[in-house]
Amino acid sequence: MPMLGTRKNITVGKNQLSYIELANDSSQPVILFLHGWGGSAESFQTLMTELNNQLSTHRHLIALDLPGFGESAPPLQAWSVADYSSCVVKYIEALSIGQVDLVVHSFGGRIATKLLNDRPDLVRKIAYLAPAGIRGNLEYIASRESRASRIKKLFQFPLLRPLFPIVRKIGYKAIGGNDYIILDGVMKETFSLVTQEDLTALLPNVQHPTEIFWGRHDSYVPVSDGEYMTKVMKQANLTIFEDGRHGIHRTHATQIANRLKSFL
């Protein structure tokens, strides 16, 4: 699929950020996309295309590469969810785009929940796509990381080392993880920080109109989290795709866009 929009770069504080922008004239707020862990702005290309085609008024769309992902440089030290939220706030202010509508997936949902609590004035509406950070899931995350770590150690033996790239692609998916689990340095520390944060207590504070989308067979974040969010958030509506998994922003982009064209 040809890239929708133009790749741009900006320096925000000490952070070198990259993003994809489809700049249409519109009186409506910018729609800002925040991707999941291991993703990038490109992961929203299908959904951006669907929204651009279905919305009656072409909106200004921006998909950001969060620091450490895509073409954005990693942070200089390990970051928390609050650090990422602060960075997104500074990015919005640097572009002078005012209030935005948020569309966020997985890890982007963590950031959005924190941002909605700290700077609610910057957001008009939000669409959560299988957001992480709800009710912890810490035991599951710790178990997955432990299994991935054991696989990595096993293939440090000289005779097995050449096979490790193949095992990493196949085996890590089988245990429910992927390359983010075996990152080193600042991003590995960042992963540990952000996955230990339980943002449940912040959810009742969200006053914004909210659409939540989930796949029934999501193996990363359970659909029960979406049901919980709907109960405690003021203006939340939940859509469950019975055949969906975690990557619903790709697999169910047409259905999501169809719902969002009236919501946004």
Image (tube, helix red, strand yellow):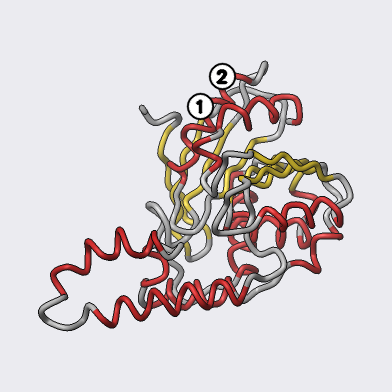
Tell me where residue 52 sits by quadrant: top right
Residue 263 locus on image (x, y percent): 76, 30
Q: Is residue 120 visible?
A: yes
Instruction: Specify the quadrant that holds the C terminus.
Output: top right
Q: Residue furthest left?
A: 159
| Residue 135 in the figure: left or right of residue 148 | right
Number of the label disc, if any, that sits on residue 53: 2
Residue 174 locus on image (x, y percent): 39, 61
Q: How many marks?
A: 2
Residue pictured at 63% horizontal, 39% vertical = 242
Residue type, label 1: Thr
Q: Residues within 10 Å of mark 2 (few under 14, many from 20)?
A: some
| Vertical position of residue 225 compared to residue 49: above or below | below
Q: Residue at x 35, y 81 (%)?
A: 150
Residue at the disc numbered 1: 49
**Residue at 62% from the left image edge and 68% from the top image edge:** 81
* Left or right of residue 258: residue 40: left
Residue 1 vs residue 130, the one in the foreground: 130
Q: Is residue 133 left or right of residue 40?
A: right
Task: Decide if residue 98 is in sight here.
Answer: no
Q: Which mark is residue 263?
A: none
Between 201 and 100, the residue placed more toward the observer is 201
The residue at the point 89 percent across, 50 percent down is 234
Report x, y in % for residue 93: 64, 50
Of residue 172 and residue 187, the one placed in the foreground of this image is 172
Q: Amino acid at mark 2?
A: Asn
Q: Quadrant of the N terminus?
A: top left
The single residue placed furthest to the right in the displayed view is 234
> Are dots 1 and 2 in contact, CB under 8 Å?
yes
Depicted 157 relative to depicted 217: above or below? below
Q: Position of residue 148 (x, y in %)?
A: 39, 74
